[in-house]
Image: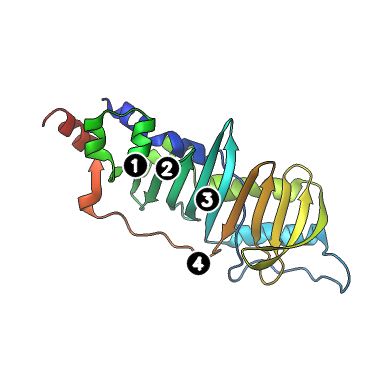
Amino acid sequence: MSRRSWLAAAAVPACLFAAACGAGGSAGTAGATRPSTPAGHGPDVAALRTAMVAAMKQARSVRVTGSTPEGAKKVGLDVVLTRAGGVAGRITLNGHSLKVRTSPRHVYLGVTKSLAGWQKLPPDACALMCGKWLKEPARELSSLAGNAGWRKIVVAFEGPLAGSGASYAGTATVGGQPALKLSLDAVGTIYVAAHGTPYLLRLESGTARINYSDWNTAVLPPPPPASKVVTVSMLAAGLNGG
């Protein structure tokens, strides 16, 4: 199997990561100043939305969870993103999952037996690859996952949040945290932290529900141990009996 074939097989769900550029989360530390809310009245929607986008721009990391449709399929996300470009977590497509982890120089893709079977990888390939991490240069994350990461999932979402018509839609609780609901014309319903820094907590749009949590406190795990890492050249050598 060629290097391109290996990467294509391993990256199918990762490519779907780029399609899930919605949002949600829980309050973190310092960010934009929260606008005041007069007693007995709803918030100043324009000011709240501006403060929320400003808070997102100042944040350093976040955990993104939830699901979003991709055609007739469903993409699940549970990933940590950092402003510096780090990604770590799991992307799931209809029950088949791919683990992703990055370091400054490399991206690691964890391939499961379920994913290998779905992609019809040969049994000898899975024996070498499944349960381990496929290591590639960091630049491969862009080609594999459509620049998935902070710029795709967070920064790209700031524009619609700031530019769509909005109205106050009441209050709710998201992950045990009080939230203010805003209805955005071109986005759907968003939930903003009612206390502290006004971070975005959740987006609901159609059948998609994406949450943001652990603003500024989400951290990336360390790279996988060397004993659990394989490279494309190692796979090729193993399949060729080298």
The kind of secondary structure element at disc 2 is: strand
Colour scheme shown: rainbow
Question: Which of disc 4 and disc 3 is earlier in sequence?
Answer: 3
Q: Which residue is mark 3?
A: 150
In the rendering, at what x and y percent does residue 90 appear? 44, 48
Q: Which residue is mark 4?
A: 217
Q: Dividing the picture into quarters, in which one does residue 200 lie?
A: bottom right
The kind of secondary structure element at disc 3 is: helix
For badge 1, the amino acid type reads Thr
| Residue lying farthest to the left in this orientation | 242
- Between the residue at mark 3 and the residue at mark 2, the CA separation in whole angstroms equals 20 Å
| Residue lying farthest to the right in this orientation | 40
The kind of secondary structure element at disc 1 is: loop
Structural crowding at the residue carrying mark 2, measured as other residues with C-alpha within 10 Å and reported as few (<14), some (14–19) or many (≥20): many
The kind of secondary structure element at disc 4 is: loop
Front tag of 4 and 2? 2
Q: Which residue is mark 2?
A: 97
